[in-house]
């Protein structure tokens, strides 16, 4: 019997702690993005039983330094690899700090339904008990699995599988640092096999109206985040409004802020800056017209998107409209 060829999985590396190195295996200090994609793959020889791997180094940064330039490069490569019929799925290795932003961004601009799996690690590659190799093994196993198709980009960390839109980094340290606080995780990996608990009912990839081409045409609208707190002043918002196309409020509670801040955001909205209200609480829903009259103030309510994901969506939505009611429809849809 002829041997069956292994599926082809592309691994795009961008850096992060999964590729991080310490001076010694027990020290807390380390440098993200020290190892190459070749080094990461060499640490998991079992991958050769799962897939024929094609590796590419797209970047090698700590994801605190993730940029729109890297997003552009990633989206282009993912689109090209998805269009290649010989590729079964794609894995992206990534730092954990902004993993959720990259995953959500890709879920809105990639127009294919092939599995795309993002993966990172909380412990550097040189650490005692580094979990990166097991995470990478699970990511490749997931990317080649037919059940992963059509769900939008997935993230696998610590044997949990998350949908791009739901996943959030909820702890600054420890291997259990990811959760999907509102709708729950997508599933788990068991011995390299995915077990999904839910469908992704949100709008993504093949259903998304957004694309890299739209972003390039619009010049990547600038959206900044204002973090609310007791005694927040308006002048910082007036300053940001002078250079931003959009502002996301990481509001207290249900997306609220001091009267001074709300007045400044109202001035910004009147001047044509898009204003989206989200919550700094980490979970829950910011609905329209609960404590503020969004229609009168010209604001958008971000629903259950956290501030950093609301920033991604507002940037994309601003490529198609500046009108608050139409922006709200985007937030209701994605
Ligand atoms: N600062 C690192 C990064 O995001 C943290 C990590 O990967 O866990 O690249």
Image (cartoon, rainbow, N blue to C red):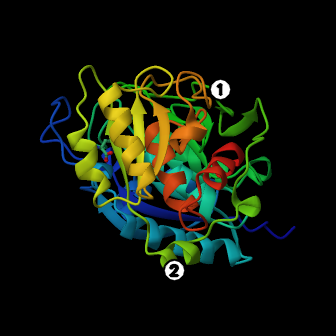
Farthest residue to the left: give it.
23
In the rendered structure, which disc, 1 or 2, sits on the residue that comes first in sequence?
Answer: 1
Quadrant of ligand 1: it is: top left
Q: What residue did someone put label 1 on?
A: 184
Task: Please determine whether, in this image, residue 278 is positioned above or below residue 6.
Answer: above
Task: Please determine whether, in this image, residue 147 is positioned above or below residue 52.
Answer: above
Q: Residue at x 40, y 23 (%)?
A: 252
Quadrant assignment for the N terminus: bottom right
Residue 120 image-quadrant placement: top left
Q: Position of residue 3 (x, y in %)?
A: 78, 67
Q: What residue did someone put label 2 on?
A: 217
Q: Position of residue 112 (x, y in %)?
A: 72, 66
Residue 52 appears left or right of 250? right
Query: Which is more foreground, mark 1 or mark 2?
Result: 2
Farthest residue to the right: give it.
1
Q: Position of residue 326 (x, y in %)?
A: 66, 55
């Amino acid at each position: 019997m002829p041997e069956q060829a292994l599926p082809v999985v592309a691994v795009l590396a961008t850096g992060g702690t999964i590729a991080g190195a310490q001076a010694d295996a027990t020290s807390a200090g380390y440098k993200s993005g020290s190892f190459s994609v070749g080094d990461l793959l060499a640490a998991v020889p079992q991958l050769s039983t799962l897939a024929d791997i094609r590796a590419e180094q797209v970047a090698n940064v700590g994801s605190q330094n993730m940029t729109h330039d890297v997003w552009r490069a990633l989206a282009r490569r993912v689109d090209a690899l998805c269009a290649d019929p010989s590729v079964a799925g794609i894995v992206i290795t990534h730092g954990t700090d902004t993993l959720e932003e990259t995953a959500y961004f890709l879920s809105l601009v990639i127009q294919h339904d092939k599995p795309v799996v993002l993966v990172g690690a909380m412990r550097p590659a040189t650490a005692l008990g580094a979990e990166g190799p097991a995470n990478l093994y699970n990511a490749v196993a997931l990317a080649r699995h037919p059940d992963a198709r059509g769900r939008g980009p997935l993230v696998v960390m610590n044997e949990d599988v998350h949908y791009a839109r739901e996943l959030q980094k909820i702890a600054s340290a420890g291997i259990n640092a990811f959760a999907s606080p509102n709708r729950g995780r997508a599933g788990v990996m068991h011995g390299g096999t995915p077990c999904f608990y839910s469908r992704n009912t949100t709008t993504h990839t093949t259903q998304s109206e957004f694309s890299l081409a739209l972003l390039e045409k619009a010049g990547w609208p600038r959206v900044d985040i204002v973090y609310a707190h007791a005694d927040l002043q308006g002048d910082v918002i007036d300053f940001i409004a002078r250079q931003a196309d959009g502002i996301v409020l990481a509001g207290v509670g249900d997306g609220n802020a001091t009267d001074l801040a709300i007045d400044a955001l109202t001035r910004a909205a009147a001047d044509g800056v898009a204003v989206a209200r989200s919550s700094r609480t980490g979970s829950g829903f910011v609905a329209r017209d609960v404590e503020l009259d969004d229609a009168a103030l010209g604001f958008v309510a971000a629903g259950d998107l956290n501030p950093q994901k609301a920033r991604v969506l507002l940037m994309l939505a601003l490529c198609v409209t500046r009108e608050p009611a139409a922006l709200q429809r985007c937030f209701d849809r994605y």
